Amino acid sequence: MKIKQRKILVLCISALIFLMCILGVIINYFVEEPSREEIFEEGYKITSADDALDNGLIIREDFLTPNLFSRPGTSLTQINNIVIHYVGNPGTSAQDNRNYFESLATTGETYASSHYVVGIDGEIIQCVPLNEIAYCSNDRNNDTISIEVCHESESGEFSKKAYQSLVMLCAWLCNAYKLDSEDLIRHYDVTGKICPKYFVDYPTEWSEFKNDVKVMMKDIK
């Protein structure tokens, strides 16, 4: 009698699990995924001060003071690409470059900034909120996120730590804004400027980078 009761109990539990699986499939089918535009509306909120990503990557907010030359406060109305740059000043840190952008508010010598700066040791500083434009990618400022990367030598090659942080940051942003690795572009692709130099000089390295981002996108949220 007890064996029969156990069998009935097992059958009931199995049936319940089956029904829950079916219900999950039905819910996933009818729940519409948000569009890229809907993601954008909330997307700029995904980064907060010292926000640690699931993979341990940390982004530190150090926003520029609103000013005409590096943070005009103009709304970024869409995000179609992520543009990769190199700082072009070997040996400087992420903080050095962020501070240079800040100094433009006083000097007014040029218009320049980026959303993120990745340091040689892999640190990441966010300079501009993701719902505002940065002055980094010429006529593509109005629909792109820009990332400057520090480097040790004139070759422009990124350190291992900088490269790893860049891959994770790009993968995270691509997932957040419903982009894919082919939506990553170089400053060179916008204007023909040799930037980021190493990825322009060695196109195969650029292709490998995009592939690394594609793989990483599967691993992080």
Image (cartoon, rainbow, N blue to C red):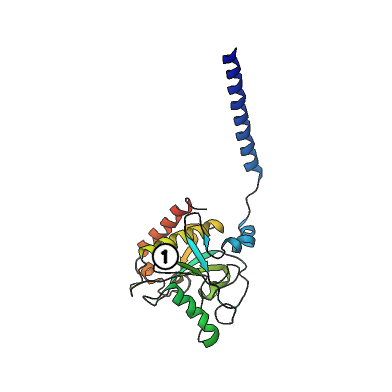
In percent of width and height, residue 211 lies at 41, 56
In percent of width and height, residue 203 lies at 37, 64
Is residue 201 left or right of 16 when viewed as pictured? left
Image height check: is 123 above or below 193? above
- Which residue is at the front of the view, 158 or 82? 158
Looking at the image, the residue that sits furthest to the front is 2
Q: Residues within 10 Å of mark 1 (few under 14, many from 20)?
A: many
Is residue 158 left or right of 181 when viewed as pictured? left
- Which residue is at the front of the view, 172 or 95? 95
Image height check: is 154 above or below 3? below
In percent of width and height, residue 106 lies at 54, 86
Residue under pointer 1: 122
Q: Secondary structure at mark 1?
A: loop
Q: Quadrant of the N terminus?
A: top right
Instruction: Count how many numbered circles sit on residues in the image.
Output: 1
Residue drawn at x 63%, y 53% as measured from the top left: 34
Is residue 98 left or right of 89 when viewed as pictured? right
Residue drawn at x 62%, y 55% as measured from the top left: 35
- Which residue is at the front of the view, 206 or 219? 219
Residue drawn at x 36%, y 66% as measured from the top left: 159
In percent of width and height, residue 153 lies at 33, 73
Q: Amino acid at mark 1?
A: Gly
Residue drawn at x 55%, y 79% as measured from the top left: 70
